[in-house]
């Protein structure tokens, strides 16, 4: 029997398999940010342990950073400032490269890893952040860890892991114009539920995946954790290699060709067997919009908000009741009739240059509805600069969008960008949990195109019906 | 890490599915650089009213669940963010074990790294515990890690599975880093086999 891509990567990274213990897996790349690392560095100090491989560790500041242009002078929130300063001190003391606020390589950790070419096929990648699954788009085994595990990786460059089960999620068919990678993954989460992937590593396959660009593949893998699976992978192909070619930390020349040969060998063998298969037909997918307070509570733009009675399972019904109350929605109302106050185009899910280009296509020559405050936080400083070079910032600003600095920002609202109670937001991020974007804030997850169209219309609207230049 | 062996306590019921880590500890409290100081902010949006007064409608605020060391939760408990601040906050609130039908992977792992025992039982068993905890005052169960059982005085006798390595670490109060440090030679050898990537 052949091996899956996951099994190949797993086998290549086994350091030890002691009897009665989880395997010890080597970690090729450890990404660090300011929020989940200070306690790990402190624990190392208290136990007199060193960072084993600072050269395989990189860090940036993203979660806490304000997105206004004063941030490089001072972070006004004193507690956030201490946390950022603590990361600076920790990196300085341990020799870890830090992409700080004034670096063009600064950005959301899951945007800059691929952008700088750190993320490569076949690697094991971890970060104290659940959206580390993003990097799986390159055919790497990438997953989020807690702070104790951050400490473990800093000290040993390994992790203890039981081998997870494997699941294939196959996207058949072809997406229609206006339907995106975000809609594919929202459809998958809607089908699987938020715990459907617990205990599994997912490989995404199928024609629709093959036709996605790298940004789309990253969007799909990014939200793997919202289905409960820690890691989601996509086999690398020419799309992957062309996207990577020439990036700063990607091998050059002959070394690149040699690496590509190795990367091609990673793909799952034809006779590999997954423990579970889920299939999704993309031919008739529509844009999706979440209506509830977890990403599995999602439906098509042409649908209505469901009623609690629509759910057979008692827990699902209670969840729907709670969600509708929190969201201020009534079962049976059309999704297109939901009016919004805010638009957030950003996050590690959908703030790459390709996402901004897609949103700009919708926005060009149009104006944001007067009732809406719309903001764009590019995924990285480099993305922002590139977008400005292409004139995307002008398109957005002329339409009435705010063009901000990069960072996690309103995806989780650790910085000053938050919703006020009752505000309703069309968001390109990944979580619509209660209070996620600000206490009492109401989040609807959508694609960048759908968020842009909602900004113009003031309510959700089927972007497939829109002409773009 | 504190050892976990056997615990008898009142059960506090939180009968909601998909309690996510944003609920357990909202993001505005993640800026601390210490492992402590999170307990008073656990379940902040549910637990407190606007003026900071305890919300009388939030079940964990009820007097009858005060001092509980065991929390019973709905399925997929701890979903979402990888923040280890969630188990830190729950432990400071007094919880030492959580009973549910399922946990999110990262959360469950984070719990075990801190000596907070996640106990997975069958749906009927969790329903029984939840119903009994909701019905009266002072409903207690005993979680015994060694025998992998949860029992009460009303005839409940449930078994649970746990990874033998994790069980041993929890019972001995061991942290992973110390155990892994004993494999330094294997790590050296692995690194020797890999050529430098960049």
Image: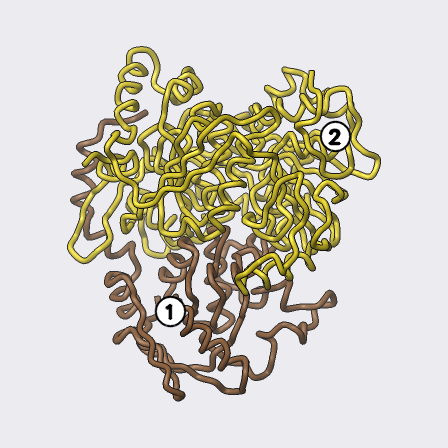
Identify the residue at image location x=61%, y=30%.
Answer: A378
Number of numbered callouts drawn: 2
Label drawn at residue B1? none
**Residue B194 % position (x, y):** 21, 31
Point out the residue furthest to the top here: A253
Identify whether A432 is placed above or below A120.
Answer: below
Name the quarter where the C terminus of chain B is drawn: top left
Image quadrant in which you'd find residue A284: top right
Tell which chain the image draws in brown.
Answer: B
Identify the residue at image location x=76%, y=31%.
Answer: A456
Q: Nearer the viewer, mark 2 or mark 1?
A: 1
Label 2 environment density (alpha carbons within 10 Å; few <14, some 14–19, many ≥20)? many
| Image side of residue A50 versus residue A347, left or right | left
**Residue A437 % position (x, y):** 65, 48
Name the quarter where the N terminus of chain B is drawn: bottom left
Residue occupied by mark 1: B121
CB contact under 8 Å: marks 2 and 1: no
Identify the residue at image location x=44%, y=50%.
Answer: A228
**Residue B123 % position (x, y):** 42, 69
**Residue B149 % position (x, y):** 31, 76
Identify whether A37 is placed above or below B95.
Answer: above
Tell which chain the image draws in yellow.
Answer: A
Front residue of A443/A274: it is: A274
Q: Chain of mark 2?
A: A
Q: CA distance from mark 2 to mark 1?
A: 50 Å
Determine whether the residue tagged by mark 2 lies in a helix, strand or loop.
loop
Identify whether A67 is placed above or below B170.
Answer: above
Front residue of A51/B20: it is: B20
Colour scheme of the rendered structure:
by chain
Identify the residue at image location x=28%, y=31%.
Answer: A268
Residue occupied by mark 2: A401
């Amino acid at each position: 029997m052949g091996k899956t891509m996951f099994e190949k990567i797993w086998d290549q990274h086994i350091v030890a398999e002691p009897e009665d213990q989880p395997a010890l897996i080597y970690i090729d790349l450890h990404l660090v940010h300011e929020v989940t690392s200070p306690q790990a560095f402190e624990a190392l100090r208290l136990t007199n342990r060193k960072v084993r491989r600072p050269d395989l560790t990189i860090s940036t500041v993203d979660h806490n950073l304000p997105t206004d242009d004063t941030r490089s002078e001072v972070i006004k929130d004193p507690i956030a400032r201490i946390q950022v300063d603590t990361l600076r001190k920790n990196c300085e003391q341990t020799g870890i490269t830090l992409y700080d606020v004034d670096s063009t390589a600064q950005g959301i950790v899951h945007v800059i890893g691929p952008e700088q070419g750190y993320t490569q096929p076949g690697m094991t990648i971890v970060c104290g952040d659940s959206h580390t699954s993003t990097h799986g788009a390159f055919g790497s085994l990438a997953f989020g860890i807690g702070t104790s595990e951050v400490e473990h990786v800093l000290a040993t460059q390994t992790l203890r892991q039981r081998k997870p089960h494997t699941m294939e999620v196959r996207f058949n068919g072809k997406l229609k114009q206006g339907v995106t990678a975000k809609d594919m993954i929202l459809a998958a989460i809607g089908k699987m539920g938020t715990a459907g992937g617990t205990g599994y590593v997912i490989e995404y396959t199928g024609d629709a995946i093959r036709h996605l660009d790298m940004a789309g593949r990253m969007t799909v893998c990014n939200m793997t954790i919202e289905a409960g699976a820690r890691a989601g992978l996509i086999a690398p192909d020419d799309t992957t290699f062309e996207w990577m070619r020439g990036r700063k930390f990607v091998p050059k020349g002959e070394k690149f060709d040699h690496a590509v040969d190795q990367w091609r060998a990673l793909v799952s063998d034809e006779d590999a067997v997954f423990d579970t298969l889920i299939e999704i037909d993309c031919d008739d997918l529509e844009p999706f919009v979440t209506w509830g307070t977890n990403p599995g509570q999602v439906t098509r733009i042409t649908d209505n908000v469901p009623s609690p009675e629509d759910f057979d399972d008692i827990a699902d019904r209670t969840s729907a009741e709670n969600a509708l109350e929190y969201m201020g929605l009534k079962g049976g109302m059309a999704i297109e009739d939901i009016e919004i106050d805010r638009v957030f185009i950003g996050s590690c899910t959908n703030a790459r240059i390709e996402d901004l280009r897609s949103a700009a296509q919708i926005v060009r020559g149009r104006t944001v509805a007067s009732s809406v405050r719309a903001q764009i936080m590019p995924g990285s400083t480099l993305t922002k600069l590139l977008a400005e070079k292409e004139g995307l910032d002008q398109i957005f600003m002329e339409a009435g969008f705010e063009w901000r600095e990069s960072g996690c920002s309103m995806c989780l609202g650790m910085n000053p960008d938050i919703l006020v109670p009752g505000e309703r937001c069309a968001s390109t991020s990944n979580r619509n949990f209660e209070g996620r974007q600000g206490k009492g804030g109401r989040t609807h997850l959508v694609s960048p195109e759908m968020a842009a169209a909602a900004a113009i219309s003031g309510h959700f609207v089927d972007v497939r019906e829109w002409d773009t230049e | 890490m504190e050892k976990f062996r056997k615990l008898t306590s009142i059960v506090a019921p939180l009968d909601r599915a998909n309690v996510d880590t944003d609920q357990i500890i909202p993001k505005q409290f993640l800026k601390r650089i210490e492992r402590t100081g999170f307990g008073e902010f656990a379940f902040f949006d549910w637990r407190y009213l606007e003026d900071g007064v305890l919300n009388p409608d939030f079940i964990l605020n009820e007097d009858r669940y005060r001092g509980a060391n065991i929390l019973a939760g709905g399925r997929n408990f701890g979903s979402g963010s990888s923040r280890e601040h969630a188990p830190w906050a729950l432990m400071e609130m007094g919880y030492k074990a959580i009973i549910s039908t399922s946990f999110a992977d990262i959360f469950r792992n984070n719990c075990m790294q801190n000596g907070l025992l996640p106990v997975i039982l069958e749906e009927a068993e969790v329903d029984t515990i939840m119903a009994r905890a909701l019905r009266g005052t002072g409903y207690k169960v005993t979680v015994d890690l060694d025998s992998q059982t949860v029992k009460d005085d009303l005839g409940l006798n449930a078994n649970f599975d746990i990874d033998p390595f994790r069980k041993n670490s929890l019972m001995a109060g061991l942290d992973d880093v110390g155990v892994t440090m004993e494999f330094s030679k294997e790590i050296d050898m692995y690194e020797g086999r890999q050529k430098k990537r960049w």
